[in-house]
Amino acid sequence: MSVNEKAGDNVYIGVDMGGTNLRVALVDPGGKILDSRKIDVRIDLGAEAVSESLAAQCVSLARAARKNKLHVQAIGLGVAGKIDRAGTVLFSPNLPPLDGYPLGDELRERTKIPVFMENDANVFGLGEGFAGAAMGMENWAGITLGTGTGGCLILGGTLWEGDGLGFCGEIGHMIIEPEGPRCPCGSKGCLEAFASARGLVTGAERLLTAIGAQSGPLYDLWRERALSSGSMYECAKNGDPLSIALFEKLGWALGIAISNIFTVLGIRNAVIGGGVSAAWDLFIEPLQASLSQSLSMLDPELALVHRASLGDSAALIGAARVAQIGIGLL
Amino acid sequence: MSVNEKAGDNVYIGVDMGGTNLRVALVDPGGKILDSRKIDVRIDLGAEAVSESLAAQCVSLARAARKNKLHVQAIGLGVAGKIDRAGTVLFSPNLPPLDGYPLGDELRERTKIPVFMENDANVFGLGEGFAGAAMGMENWAGITLGTGTGGCLILGGTLWEGDGLGFCGEIGHMIIEPEGPRCPCGSKGCLEAFASARGLVTGAERLLTAIGAQSGPLYDLWRERALSSGSMYECAKNGDPLSIALFEKLGWALGIAISNIFTVLGIRNAVIGGGVSAAWDLFIEPLQASLSQSLSMLDPELALVHRASLGDSAALIGAARVAQIGIGLL
């Protein structure tokens, strides 16, 4: 009996392919996680090894499902970067060996289960929209604050895909300050240069250099090569004004980005998630202040900025939702 | 026989209610203007007088149509500002006496013809999309450079209306430079502060003050209270570097706005119209340069910025299209 032979109620596998961890979950049609696994991504062993261990995890999960009389109808594969829905990773900033690799195709061949791919920010949007903070919202913008800044748009209740150019909802690359800091994308003053883990760290380095710092908690972190969004958060919570200023700048930039999106799209809901959103208490007030100041068409009281509610699970539930939508369209 | 009694082929009346002129046209279902009239708007005589003369023009046009065996099915009324589709002008920056006036309702009562209202930027979008530069385009952003800067979004081939908040596509109030010049809306550094007739004039005043100008062609215009987008265009064409710089700044700001829209929406077409777009030759190169520099997700060669092709007629054809769509939805 094949691993995906019809054997009971339909379920989906959601895969979150991150830079360090690979997580897979069995998700029911209502968005509930039934089972999940997490393994290290050994990208140092090459793309083929990653592809093999991904398939092994999925096969194992599908077998476990079958024992419980569940049938895995499809796999949804969320990967950071630019992807080709057909099954190839076009460009993955966090997993460079995967660039151009037919990860989806191989998973389909190895598991004999239909596979649908989507980028991580869209997967986040589908997850939060299906079972999280954006449940029932027709029109909203999603922003993920991670190593970089991801984004997605849900319009009319579905993931907006634009002209199908291979990118969409790239809120992190809206320009907030044209003469602002250089972003890895090549432009200056993108949202990502302020509102991401990498933006916080490079912002700290720039600030410390600009003021010629020789001491202080942020300087110590820098010298110890221990700057990260997490260590900077601790630093800010302990009262360090430089760290506090960087989280305030993050909130300020997000407020302008969200204002511009609301103004252009005539919408009023945004959902913010991703690892750096754990610093919510440090940036939400400056965000609201900057949003209120920037919004000229909408009463600021009608503008709603929600905190994502699914945490890490958004990626797994969203990836399963990609599978569910994909199989429905076949 | 009533003016709108069925008497032949269906046609529509499109109305362009501007700050100085009122234009009405008879438009066939294919977007062709069959007849048109233009009268002065005597807003000094009050809202009721304007409403009366608007109705008189429409009645006269409907009668003329009937003589040609044409039947006016509906009137589309384009007005600058925030409007309530039901028939009331909520806020009209160019015609303040109309604020809160039931212009559409009165027109309906006086003519006995169904009336549908829409704001001027959306009317522009519907006109250019139906019979102009954007014919056949699925997804695009429209920008009108007039006294202020209007905008609209066409997504999936239809006018995008967002959450129905009474505004949408307000591209003129995207913030381009957070510490930039104050916009009449209250925010700083909006696109409109750079890319509109008013933005050009206030930009000239600011520039002349900042450099302490005591002579020169732009200074002379200022002293003579003759600053306008038209006189500044002439000045720039005669080689005045200050005027040239202001049109370059206009192009620069438009490039960033369009880049942000393309990046967030994953689209690649924009159409620019409005009176100030007559200065196309002065701003299109700086616009393209700034767009290319700002776009990180899209190959700049795939980004298309089109010049609107219908001129003043976009408003009339678009307003007639509002009528045509409106009657189809009844």
Image (tube, coloured by chain):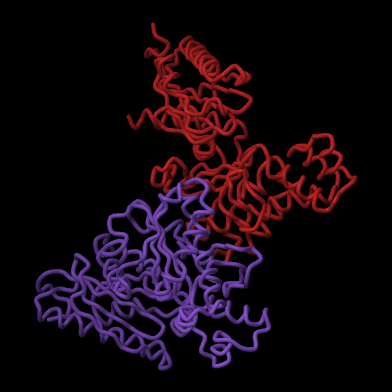
Chain colours: A purple, B red
Q: Residue furthest right?
A: B215
B157 sits to left or right of B279: left
| Outermost residue toward the top in this view | B1
Q: Where on the picture, by quarter, is residue A19? A: bottom left
Position of the C terminus of chain A, as image quadrant, is bottom left
A5, B241: nearer the viewer:
B241
Q: Is residue B100 above or below residue B223?
A: above
Given residues B199 and B318, the one toward you in this image is B199
Residue at 43% across, 15% down: B111
What x and y, as percent, mark residue A26? 21, 76
Most distant residue in the front direction? A239
The quarter of the displayed image where residue B116 is located: top left
* Position in image of residue B319 (x %, y %): 49, 30
The residue sitting at 66% across, 37% down in the picture is B275
Q: Is residue A127 left or right of residue B245?
A: left
User: Does any portion of residue A217 appear in the rendered image?
Assistant: yes
Residue A130: x and y in percent read: 27, 62
Q: Quadrant of the N terminus of chain A?
A: bottom left
Q: How many marks?
A: 0
Residue situated in front as seen by the camera: A48 or B109: B109
Residue that appears at 50% across and 38% down:
B122
